[in-house]
Image (cartoon, rainbow, N blue to C red):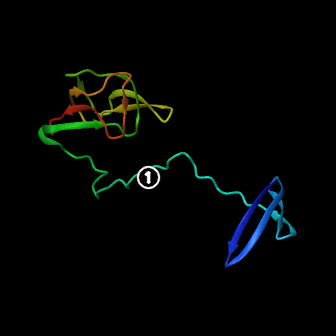
Amino acid sequence: MKQFKFIIRGNEYEVDVKKLESGMAKIEVNGTLYDVELQKEDKLSKTPILVRPPVPVTKDAHQIKKTEGGTFKVKAPLPGNILKIYVKEGDEVKKEERLLLYEAMKMENTLVAEKEGRVKSIKVREGDVVLQEDVLLELETEQ
């Protein structure tokens, strides 16, 4: 098949590959026949591995934060698609009243008001794709 010459530690070797099939090779080295088992090389994946830095979490991250002027921002808890908006700007909403319906992780989720207030602005439309922590709408509260 193929012939090779190797010099290893000053010694010259003539290698003749006689037969190669299914992970086994029959080779002749300086006139002596050997059966050699071949190892498969691990091929590197063509898919890149994305490494995200850890998300910084403060001690009070789980608490609702008040914003200036009594405005409360309703944020997307997960990435998803906005399916239906139940309120419009200027609407008065009560606690636990539904605000919008969105799909995340192949499930439909209804977001409800955590506080009473008036809808100050709606930042999304039906059909929009949102990421986690995107502001969906703002409520103006009395607090």
Q: Is residue 1 left or right of residue 111?
A: right
* Residue 139 rendering spot, x and y as whole percentages: 22, 32
Residue that numbered label 1 is attached to: 51
Give the amino acid type for the residue marked by disc 1 in the picture. Val
Depth check: give the residue in front, 71 or 32.
32
* Residue 136 rendering spot, x and y as whole percentages: 29, 32
* Residue 78 rendering spot, x and y as whole percentages: 40, 39
Position of residue 93 relative to residue 46, above or below, is above
Depth check: give the residue in front, 5 or 51.
5
Depth check: give the residue in front, 121 or 49.
49
Depth check: give the residue in front, 33 or 135.
33
For label 1, the SS is: loop
* Residue 95 rendering spot, x and y as whole percentages: 29, 33
Q: Residue at x 32, y 22 (%)?
A: 125
For residue 58, what is the image quadrant? bottom left
Q: Residue at x 26, y 20 (%)?
A: 88
Position of residue 81 relative to residue 132, above or below, is above
Position of residue 66 relative to residue 4, above or below, is above
